Amino acid sequence: MSSEDNKKKNSKKSWVWEWFKTDENGIHICQVEVSDGQICNKNYKTASSTGNLINHLINKHQINDKIIKKDYVVKKKL
Ligand SMILES: [Zn+2]
């Protein structure tokens, strides 16, 4: 019931939204840049749990909550 708990819960979740945007239909779309100028665009329905989104980021992009968008550098093709 403390606001501390709420804050914790939100911040744990929020890193995912650095990488996903939600469109007008409530679809979550992955915004990770996969190569020069190319966005992943993998989309998930609104009902998808954050866990699915997290799994996608970790498995496909090796992105976790320790990586912030600013620091993410796309692997440029050689
Ligand atoms: Zn993606």
Image (cartoon, rainbow, N blue to C red):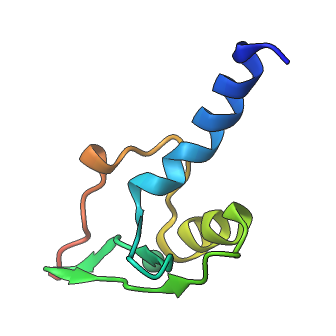
Q: Nearer the viewer, residue 57 or 24?
A: 24
- Residue 73's image quarter? bottom left
User: With 2 as the anchor, is 19 left or right in this view?
Assistant: left
The structure residue drawn at horizontal position 59% and vertical position 74%, both measured from the top left corner, is: 56
Q: Nearer the viewer, residue 36 or 1?
A: 1
Image position, residue 23 (x, y; %): 38, 76
Name the residue furthest right: 1
The image quadrant where one finds the C terminus is bottom left
Which quadrant of the frame does ligand 1 lie within?
Answer: bottom left
Name the residue furthest front: 24
Numbered label tally: 0
Q: Is residue 39 above or below residue 17?
A: below
The structure residue drawn at horizontal position 61% and vertical position 69%, both measured from the top left corner, is: 53
The structure residue drawn at horizontal position 25% and vertical position 45%, both measured from the top left corner, is: 70
The structure residue drawn at horizontal position 30% and vertical position 54%, both measured from the top left corner, is: 72
User: With 6 as the anchor, is 74 left or right in this view?
Assistant: left
The image quadrant where one finds the N terminus is top right
Image position, residue 19 (x, y; %): 41, 61
- Residue 47's image quarter? bottom right
Image position, residue 76 (x, y; %): 18, 74
Q: Nearer the viewer, residue 47 or 37?
A: 47
Q: Is residue 44 above or below residue 8?
A: below
Image position, residue 8 (x, y; %): 68, 26
